[in-house]
Amino acid sequence: MKKIMIVEDDRKIAEHLRNYIEKYRFEVIKVTDFDYVMETFRQHTPDLVLLDINLPSYDGYYWCRQIRKESICPVIFISARIGEMDQVMAIENGGDDYITKPFHPEIVMAKIRSQLRRAYGEYAAKTEERVLEREGLHFFPERLELSYAGNGTSLSKKEADIIESLLERYPRVAGREDLLAKLWDDQTYVDENTLNVNITRVRKKFQSIGIEDAVETVRGAGYRLQVSWTKEDEQ
């Protein structure tokens, strides 16, 4: 039985969603203490999360980022915010879909089914866990993990997307446009510095596992992965 976690502070809406979703034989976990969203997530390991934006203490964008540090399960935002930038922010912070309030419960169920099919069902990959390996570097896309010479680190979803592109192109250059297309559906909303910030984070991840100068900037083209330079080699 698939598990759906609801993070919604409006009790009537949360209860309405719970009752409706349970009719379709899903197990529903309803968050009640919004200071402990991640504790609830870790305890129940849901297959999908329905997430409001306006929440006590921290907003839904924050909680989606926290989830993405540990999981790639589908996250559907449900919010009264109807602005385009709200939807862009939801996707950029790791969301998979966006539903505006007021909503029809059948629309919610259709989107839940769609995301579950993509992640686990008929549209999901039927292969064993993927591992990309280059020069002793191991990348686990499904786990969001990277390891080298016995050292490992966890990744955010965007860091993992960048590293996957670099590994797939290695030793060739991964173009800036290609990276932007992989990370964001609509490049017109991306600030020029956004990719640079994420590349910096990726470089720090490589440094944490012992690889210095891992991502080379190729002017006018993009970025190239350098796996051979390690801290041990420099000593």
Image: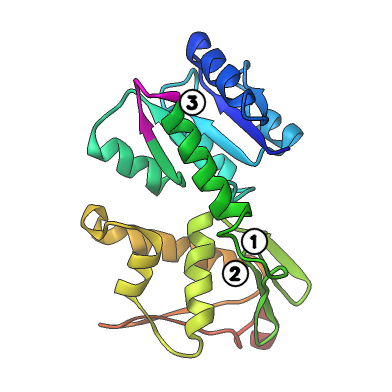
Which corner quadrant of the image does residue 175 belong to? bottom left
Q: Residue 135: percent from the left, percent from the top?
A: 66, 87
Badge 1: residue crowd in 10 Å (few <14, some 14–19, many ≥20)? some
In this view, 74 is above or below 33: below
Residue type for callout 1: Glu
Whole-angstrom CA distance, mark 2 to mark 1, is 22 Å
Closer to the N terminus: mark 3 or mark 2? 3
Q: Residue 209: percent from the left, percent from the top?
A: 67, 69
In this view, 185 is above or below 136: above
Q: Is residue 184 visible?
A: yes
Foreground mark, 2 or 1, reads 1
Instruction: Give the numbered dot on residue 58.
Output: 3
Closer to the N terminus: mark 2 or mark 1? 1
Q: Is residue 65 visible?
A: no
Which corner quadrant of the image does residue 44 belong to? top right
* Quadrant of image for the N terminus: top right
**Residue 102 magenta-highlighted:** yes
Q: Residue 139: percent from the left, percent from the top?
A: 64, 71
**Residue 143 magenta-highlighted:** no
> 200 or 111: which is nearer to us?
111
- Residue on which disc 1 sits: 142
Q: Are marks 3 and 2 in contact (CB under 8 Å)?
A: no
- Residue on which disc 2 sits: 207
> 150 or 70: which is nearer to us?
70
* Quadrant of image for the C terminus: bottom right
- Residue depicted at 63% across the width and 53% down the height: 120
